[in-house]
Every structure is written in structure tokens, then in C-alpha cells.
Amino acid sequence: MAGALTLVGLTACSGDDSSADDDADDNDSSGDRDTPTPSNGEPVVDADVPDEALIFGWISEVFDQGIRRPGYPADEWTETYTEDLFREFGLEDVRLEPVNCLKWEPGDVTLEVVGAGETRQLDAFPVPYSTPVDGLEVEIAKFDENAPDATRGKAALTDVAFIGIPADLMVGSGTLPEDRSRRAYDPDGTLVGHTHLTPSQTGMVLEPTAEHGAAAFIGSLKDHPGDPYTFYAPYDAHQVPIPAVFVRGSDGDWIHEQLAAGPVTIKLSVAGEQSEIVTNNVIGELPGADDDIVIVGSHHDGPWASAVEDGSGIAMVLAQAKYWAARPQEERPHRMIFVLQAAHMAGWVGQKAFVAEHADELERTVLQVHLEHAGKDVVEENGELVDTGLPVPRWFFTSRNPELEESVYTALEAEDLKRTIILSPDAIGGRPPTDGVAFYDAGVPIMNFLGAPWYLFHEADTLDKVDKENLVGITRTVIRIIGDTAGTSAADMRAGTVAVDPKNPEHGPPATPPPGDGGVYEPVES
Ligand SMILES: [Zn+2]
């Protein structure tokens, strides 16, 4: 996910008058589609669908390698591992395509806080791409957005809180058809009345402190479950112009108490290293019934060992690759390109590299499917993390093609993939905040699956968070959606898509950072 959400000024949503008619046309014409029928006459061939143990096993193996940031040994290992699996499945033209990126590695941090009557050494973690400093001694003050200059020359203490949204909010966000009865598949009613805790984002609280001349940023991870001090955001690979660290929410509360009693100073040393590296997009292909293309992707790096972000995405792509490789060429609706993109956590430049270097293929792409974050809805109760038994609400960002939307809903229903919302691509900030947004920007029809649990950027993203029970269901749902593109050309799909105006004021709430505002794509010189 390219960034979590600032959910302010939620918009009412406009109906799209034309789409009701389109829907009707669709239903009439759907019987004309030239769908190759698999040999068993069903849309999914059960025997070729990888089972839960296999899919979860891929996640476990990747997770066990450790922190998977771009350029880390675990991420390089994952490139080779997935490249080998693509070959083993029988994909063609399996290759690594190099991507330039800016690697960042945190170094040692010491933070001493001298309060009214007490001095403490606090655990702290550097904000990615922040400025190193050695022994900065400075007064600390609470950052006040109504008086932002009050922390000029001081360390600005800010709470980095979570944002809870109504779990069904996105059903009505963005440009939508008039009939919204098939926008959410939630037969158990677990969306209405529930709060969805979305990943916290630091950019929106960090940037104003630096803009107003703060000497340092101290981000208190207020109310983050488990009271951690480690957190990996923002990850747009933009230089943070001041020293910046995160501390535990409980320690942040203690600093607030000290400030109430009198002046407080800090002594801060923070190290971090940046380097330009080459990482790789991992790609494999399969020929299909025609030469139009379906692209299936995710990203192979992550902020930590990150089982859900995006160990789960890697495994969901592997599951599609294995399934479709096992089916005969004539049953694959189109040529298929599988891509595990690099450097999502370094300004999401892997997707930018792919889009820049495959412009001719994008023209012929019927659908770009991106798969990210199959996670459980886990909450904190009495200081413990508790599994609610539910998946985090699933968001399927889907281009506004009524036939495609209907295909997605039908697949969700057929596989009983509950707690799922079909989102307009502009439901959040005008563009999907996914690792596939560069395809959307390039005009490619999309179906991007994204879960957005609060723990995406935390070390707490461990194997127990994976929505294991639904890995097969998600895989089957995606198989159906891809299979259903048979007989639809890239030109057909575009022609049937209702344009979403990026400047439409009826867009959903903004995302921070804007999903496209990441690192700069620079071609690798050969
Ligand atoms: Zn992801």
C-alpha cells in the first residue's frame, strides 16, 4: 500500500447516470461471450488450485528470511526464490528486470530525555530516509498545528495516531453507479457498524514540523497495539530534512507529563545510511488463447519480515502462476505476465519501471490484477492482540467497466468471499493507493485487491496475521475474474469503461502520501 489514509472531508458520492443502462446492456450481452470452457466444464479446475498448506508455506518461507526491505539479503533471496518457482511452474521467459532504487538502512539511535525531575533513555527508531545527527541537544515541545512555529528550533513531539473508519465507508466512496446493490459482498453483515483501523501514516504529521523549522521530530506511536517503538513509514524515498524518530506511545505520554511540569530537553543521536542500489522486478509469462494480455502482480519487498505486506501478495501471485501454468494454453484467456515488483518500500519504483519499460504491452492489456495483503482483522483488547476471526475488509479496486464489476461481484458470490467491497478506483484520493497504481495511471483496466490492516508497517505483521483460511478462496475468486476476461479484448475492456475524472470533486477522501508521489524512476543503464 502506497500510503494510508487521511480521512477527512468525506464526500458524498455521485451516481453515474449512464451506468444503469450499461448494466442492462451487459446482462443482455453476457451470454455472447466466447469463454473457453475448461475440460471439466467449470470456471475453476479444483485439482490445479494450490491448497492452503502450499500457499501458506510460500509465505512462511519468505517470512523466515527476515527483514525484506529493498536491497536487504532477504529481499534478494526472495527474488531468486520466486524466479526459481516461476521456472518450476513452467512459465516462459522468466527473468529479472533491474530497477534503480534508493536503499535506506537504519543505524544506532540514542535518545535521552531530561525532564523536570527525571532523566530517561528511551527506545527509538529512525524515520525512514530521515537526516542523521550526532548528539543534538535541544528543548522539546508539543507540536501544535494551530501554532506550528512554536516548535521552531526545538524538537517537535507529535502523536502518530491511528485512524478508524466505518468498515463500510468505501462502499459509497468515489464515482459510482446508481445501483450500488452489488458493490459489497457481506452476507454476514460484518461491515456495517464495525470500525476499520487503517494503517497510520506519518507524512501528514511529520512534514508540517519540518516545514515550520523544527530541529527534530519525535513521533509518539500513540495507542499502537503492543506499544511498539518501531514503525516503517513514510516510505516514499523522499529525504526527510530533519532528524526524526519514533518512540513508544507510553514514552510519548511520559514526555507529555514531563512537559506539563516544566521544560524538557533531549539529547538525540541517530544514524541511517542511504545508498543507490539495483533491485529487480521478477517476471514470467505464459502464452494464452490470444495475444492480448492479463498482468498479475504484487511486490516482493516489505518493511519487516512482513508476512501480510507482502508475503501474502507474493504467495497469491505464485498461486495464480502455478494454476494457470497447469492449464492448457487455449484455456488461458490471454497471454499472461506475472510480475513481482521491487522497491515498493523505496518509493514504489518497481511498478514505475515496469510501466515505463512495457508501454507497448500495456496497450494490449485487458486487465491488470494486483494482489496485496490477505490479512486478519486483529484488535487490541486489554493489552493483548486478539484475532477477531474475521479478515480485514477486502478492497477490490475495480475499473468502472460494468461488465468487469459484475464479473468481480459474481466471483465473490460464487466463492463466498465475504467482507469484500468493490471500490471505484477513485474511492480514496482519486487513485488506488496500491502497488498497481502506475498501471491505472497509464490507462490500463485494473482489478487491484488490497487489504489495509493497521499492522502493515509494523513488526507485528507476523505469520499469525495472515488470513490463511481464505488464501484458497481469494485464489479461486481471482481465477474466475481472470477466466471471465476470455473473449474480451483490451480494446473492448477500455471501450466499456466509464471514465473516472481524476479532478472530480466527488472523489473519496485523500490518501497520504498521494499514491503516485513516490521515488523517481530512472532507467538502469545497460
Ligand atoms: Zn503491499
Image (spheres, rainbow, N blue to C red):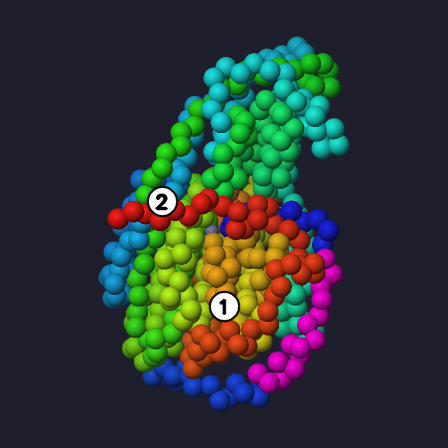
Q: Which mark is residue 100?
A: 2
- The CA distance from mark 2 to mark 1 is 26 Å
Labels 2 and 1: the sequence-earlier one: 2
Is residue 32 among the parts visible in the rendering?
yes
Residue 79 x, y percent position in the rendering: 31, 50
Residue 404 x, y percent position in the rendering: 53, 74
In the image, is residue 300 above or below residue 46?
A: above
In the image, is residue 258 above or below residue 319?
A: above
For the residue marked with disc 2, what is the amino acid? Answer: Asn
At x 65% / y 47%, what residue is drawn? 6
For the residue marked with disc 1, what is the amino acid? Answer: Pro
Residue 117 x, y percent position in the rendering: 66, 10
Is 274 colored magenta in this rendering?
Answer: no
Question: Along the horizontal axis of the image, is 166 left or right of 386?
Answer: right
Asked if ligand 1 lies within 8 A of label 2, the reply is: no
Residue 409 x, y percent position in the rendering: 56, 73
Query: The residue tagged with tag 2: helix, strand or loop?
Result: strand
In the image, is residue 243 above or below residue 286?
A: above
Q: Which residues are magenta?
A: 11-26
Q: Which mark is residue 445?
A: 1
How crowded is the residue under tag 1: few (<14 C-alpha within 10 Å), some, or many (20+)?
many
465 or 165, which lies in front? 165
Residue 330, quarter of the rendered image: bottom left
Q: Are marks 2 and 1 in contact (CB under 8 Å)?
A: no
